[in-house]
Image (cartoon, helix red, strand yellow):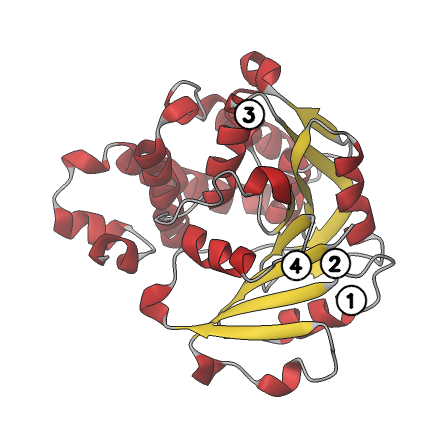
Amino acid sequence: MVIDLIIPTYKPGDKFQESLKRLALQTRKPDRIILVNTEAEFFDEEMITPYDNVEVHHIKKEEFDHGKTRDYGASLSKEADILMFMTDDAIPKDKYMVENLIKAFDDPIVTAAYGRQMADPEKNYIEYYTRIFNYPLESRVKTKEDLDTLGIKTFFCSNVCSAYRRSEYAMGGFEHKTIFNEDMIMASKMIEDGKAVAYQADARVWHWHDYKAIQQLHRNFDLAVSQVDHGGLFLKVRSESEGVKMVIATIKHLFKKGKLYLIPKYVIDTGFKLIGYKLGRNYKKLPKWMVLKLTMNQTYWKA
């Protein structure tokens, strides 16, 4: 089985260099690591010289698109049976990450798999707990039959650490104009087609953000726009209920752990997320100038 790993990069830094080091130590190394870098001037070629399986291909900032850029990387892979994707700020937790991720494809019905994201409780405790909520300890395989119980989480799949069976990916690939959420769009199509998406809890990566409240609003605005623009099953299942469950669970957890001082920030961040999401779901009713103020991705609207 041939595995190629595609990583979009933009001003890659220390996390990316650590990721390359750990990828080189994997029990099952990717056969090729294909970097699609935005803006050559921000890329230090010396970062990849120690690795003989790493190559870089540069694009301009105005060419970047969450789906199209990853699909371009996939097009550079000619022989791989499995197309793996990561982001440049995700770091493998251990040397078994790749091996554990691709085990999902032992099941012939599985066409996509994604790993478990973890956050450091010392650096961002709220993110640490919400990661556990969204990425539990138990692995599972999700199909269309799970829609009634899991709702929107049936489609959950993250290109922070993911893999796709090449034969199924070739049937459509990532959408070429996506503001965000290209991974869940792909997963929703696979689920709708009767395929399965696997969550591999033992394929672990360190990955978290320290977004401010306004950044949460922008991010959730784009998330909702992606759901509206690509429709399908996204518009037939509710996502708010999952968000409410996480909010209640997180507040209870913070109370239990005596971290009451974190609750105001969490409530404010959650409020901004909800506002962003609601505005995004109704973006077609908003004037263009407001949309450009609310989005994280100006290029998407100008293309």
Task: Give residue 2's position: percent from left, percent from top.
Answer: 75, 54
Q: Which of these two is toward me, 110 or 265?
A: 110
**Residue 203: % across, % down:** 76, 46
Reading the chain from its start, which is encountered first: label 1 or label 4?
4
Above or below for 151 versus 215 = above
Q: Looking at the image, is mark 3 or mark 1 nearer the viewer?
A: 3
Closer to viewer: mark 1 or mark 4:
4
Tell me which numbered mark, 3 or 2, is placed earlier along the sequence. 2
- The secondary structure type at the circle numbered 4 is strand
Q: Which label's residue is closer to the chain start, 2 or 4?
A: 4
Does dot 1 land on a helix, a strand or a loop? helix
Estimate the spatial distance between the alpha carbons at disc 3 and disc 2, rounded to whole Å.
27 Å
Query: How crowded is the residue under tag 2: few (<14 C-alpha within 10 Å), some, or many (20+)?
Result: many
User: Which residue is label 1 attached to?
Assistant: 22
The Cα–Cα distance between marks 1 and 4, rounded to whole angstroms, is 14 Å
Between discs 4 and 3, the one toward the N terminus? 4
- Label ID, residue 92: 2
According to the image, label 4 marks what residue?
A: 5
Percent coordinates x, y for residue 115 in the rendering: 70, 44
* Residue pictured at 41% horizontal, 47% vertical: 180
